[in-house]
Image: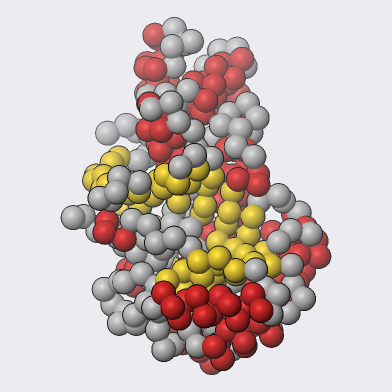
Amino acid sequence: MMETDKYLFDLNQDQLKDYFVSIGEPPYRVEQLWNASYTHFAQDFNQVTAFPVRLRSQLACDMHFSHLKTVERFASTDGETIKNLFTLPDGNLIESVLMHYNERKTLCISSQSGCAMGCVFCATGQMGFRRNLSAGEVIEQVLFLGRELSQSGEKITNIVIMGMGEPFHNYDAVLEAIDRLNDPNGLNLGARRFTISTVGIVPGIRRFAAEKRQVNLAISLHAANDTLRSVLIPANRKYPLSSLMEACGEYIRQTNRRLTFEWALIRDVNDSVEHARELAVLLKGLLCHVNIIPLNPTTSYHGKATTEEQAQEFKRVLENNGIPCTIRARRGIDIAAGCGQLAARRA
Ligand code: SAH
Ligand code: SF4
């Protein structure tokens, strides 16, 4: 076991520069290391071939290259969805999912191990909160899957922070990770290719609005009245719909960007024509779009997915009220890689 708890992907360029200077190396080492790890997906310090061998060994003594170890890899039967289960150095587990939609290669990454929000229909909520991920641990999920894709000549096109955890409960680390992945000298993935999904943490939405970023934002709504929403999403008791919708309005005013609202359709719970009408009233006049997710099964929630016909009916009501709506394709359900199914369990 190494003595150090320094971890490459937790360090920004300035911190790395200080490190290299402290060991008597020129500052351009940062660029070389950055290029090897963020652009060429090096797997360890030994693959940083621009460095002399003694420098590679010194780095390997001074810091960890990696925090993530793959424990298991699951592929859906259609081969389009791959889920990776990783352990962190303290034994906590996280999952990340890679989805192939023709040319689109979307990564769904985790912001926490577990989640403290306790949404009743979500497997991550059902497992409880373990801990926040560091910025480096968020980044490394992307680089790991980016490396896999690069081996077949492919590239990440989109990143959604919709895996385990509530990203606005770990705001600084998540945004730092996005900034780093956005860096033109590294992975260089445009801000508009990222989507953060939040359960509706109002201070987080307001802070994000004030930062006027180009990163997309999705809000998990699932109910358009406080009584039902508080049952499904306990966080609604702290941030009820009135304050949530005000914050959403603020986000749209500040950024002029279209907001996405997510709605998991649960049979006989939130899928009726009346529910759709209530939602249409709530969203009236907002620059937004609704993404319907047919409920995915989880062990501790007995709600059922809505039928295809009912989902279409729900969509029609929204569209008739001028609200654009899409039904999210169900992917990776056979390997429990669908929305809300990430529970970090071994097969
Ligand atoms: N914590 C964030 C992001 C992770 S959850 C959030 O809640 O937004 C990603 C999305 O999956 C959310 O919209 C969430 O409500 C949804 N989801 C959770 N459990 C689900 C399930 N069983 N079926 C379908 N969608 C689910
Ligand atoms: Fe956490 Fe999102 Fe799951 Fe709710 S839906 S428990 S916020 S991961």
Which quadrant of the figure contains the N terminus?
top left
Question: How many numbered circles are shown?
Answer: 0
Colour scheme of the picture: secondary structure
Q: On the rendered structure, is 332 left or right of 26? A: left
Looking at the picture, tell me which residue is in the foreground, 80 or 308. Answer: 308
**Quick check: 272 above or below 73?**
below
Classify the position of ligand 2 by quadrant: top left, top right, bottom left or bottom right. bottom left
* Residue drawn at (60%, 24%) of the image: 17
Left or right placement of residue 242 versus residue 189 in this view: right
Task: Answer above or below: position of 83 versus 20.
Answer: below
Farthest-out residue, left: 347
Tell me the residue at 48%/85% (across/down). Answer: 270
At 45% across and 46% down in the image, what residue appears? 101
From the viewer's side, name the closer residue of 103 and 117: 103
Residue 221: image quadrant is bottom right
Residue 78 seen by the camera = yes
Q: Picture coordinates of residue 222 (x, y %)?
A: 52, 78
At horizontal 39% and vertical 8% (from top left) the residue drawn is: 53
Q: Examine the rendering and report whether any part of residue 136 can be seen.
A: no
Compared with 186, 347 (above or below) is below
